[in-house]
Amino acid sequence: MSSLLLTPQLNNITGFHIEPTNICTLKCAGCARTRFIQQWPQHWKNHSIDVSDLMRFLDCDLVGKRINLCGNYGDPIYHPEFHDMVRELKQKGCVLSIVTNGSYQKSEWWQQLVSILDSTDTMVFSVDGIPDNFTQYRINADWPSIEQAMQICVDSQVKTVWKYLVFSYNQQDIQTADQLSQQLGLDEFLVVQSDRFDEQTELLKPSVNFLGSRYYKQQNWKNNYGSNTLDAKCASGKEHYISAEGYYAPCCYLQDHRFYYKTQFGKNKSLYKISDTILKQILTQSPTIEFYNNLSQQSGCQYNCPQII
């Protein structure tokens, strides 16, 4: 696609990516949360979206819109009013996809959650390996509580997915994990090629046949082998992102602190605070329009959204 993106309009939006909270119980090596806390522990603060602010900010018809409740820094299930948020989004007619590791919540909590959801919704459990080894990446995760959560979701109307990032320690266990997912009754086993490999995660990097095109495109960009042609995530119309702190950004990639403060959205945060504005105002203000029409000039976009051939 062309790197030029026309200004997004409310009636063209098909969905959102919302991070309910940046709270998490895990310490995954490739996670932005882990990296931030390691580098600037004195600056870390826990945040959870104010549900009232969120619902007022989303000033468009939400019927049939897919809302992805997924962490950039945290795990959505630790939002203190998560059930209320889900209930309000469902009352607006949303279709929900919830991505979580699934650790530590009690069975009663999961029973309440699935009673709000329906057959259009999806629960994705991020478990990268088999019970004996997946905590090599998902540090501090808890298999018994995850398995319990999976079973409750399987027994409900919700579509239940096991998402499996491939690393060096688990690349031989894909078939075993797939068989376990079938035994547990999950609807889908999803294998994903990760690109989160640098000097801190080099030991986790799998063999070359498990590294996708995105990883190599990013390496080329890092090594100044030329600018990438963009396949912008925000062009889909479904990736309008709202952070746990309550700020709008075009996508979760650019809200990562390694890119955020180099963009219009990080430099002028006050323009994008959901408690002080509504979505329509953000999409029609000139700084936003200028950003969307100059994606090819954004280093964060070049790195995060290379066109995959």
Image (cartoon, rainbow, N blue to C red):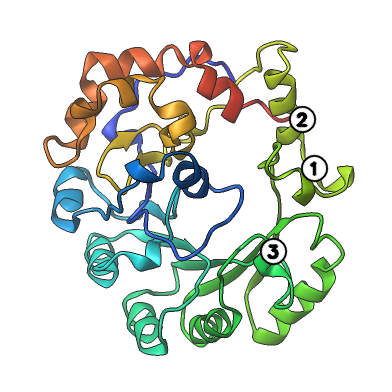
Instruction: Report the residue marked by disc 2.
Output: 216
At horizontal 22% and vertical 35% (from top left) the residue drawn is: 279
At horizontal 69% and vertical 68% (from top left) the residue drawn is: 134
**For marks 2 and 1 on the same chain, the one whose residue lies earlier in the sequence:** 1
Instruction: Report the residue marked by disc 3.
Output: 136
Q: In this view of the protein, can residue 189 be seen by the observer? A: no
Label 2 and label 1: CA atoms lie apart by: 8 Å
Instruction: Report the residue marked by disc 1.
Output: 211
Label 3 and label 1: CA atoms lie apart by: 19 Å
Instruction: Judge from the rendering whether residue 145 lies leftward or rightward of residue 229; answer left or right.
Output: left
Q: Residues within 10 Å of mark 1 (few under 14, many from 20)?
A: some
**For marks 2 and 3 on the same chain, the one whose residue lies earlier in the sequence:** 3
Look at the numbered disc 1 and give the secondary structure of its residue.
Answer: loop
Q: Residues within 10 Å of mark 3 (few under 14, many from 20)?
A: some
The amino acid beneath tag 2 is Tyr
**For marks 3 and 1 on the same chain, the one whose residue lies earlier in the sequence:** 3
The answer to which of 190 and 264 lies nearer the viewer is 264
CB-based contact (under 8 Å), mark 2 and mark 1: yes
Q: Position of residue 143 (x, y in %)?
A: 60, 79
The answer to which of 50 and 27 lies nearer the viewer is 27
The amino acid beneath tag 3 is Gln
At horizontal 45% and vertical 39% (from top left) the residue drawn is: 252
At horizontal 22% and vertical 22% (from top left) the residue drawn is: 284
Q: Quadrant of the N terminus?
A: top right
Look at the numbered disc 2 and give the secondary structure of its residue.
Answer: helix
Instruction: Judge from the rendering whether residue 199 lies leftward or rightward of residue 16; answer left or right.
Output: right
Look at the numbered disc 3 and give the secondary structure of its residue.
Answer: helix
CB-based contact (under 8 Å), mark 3 and mark 1: no
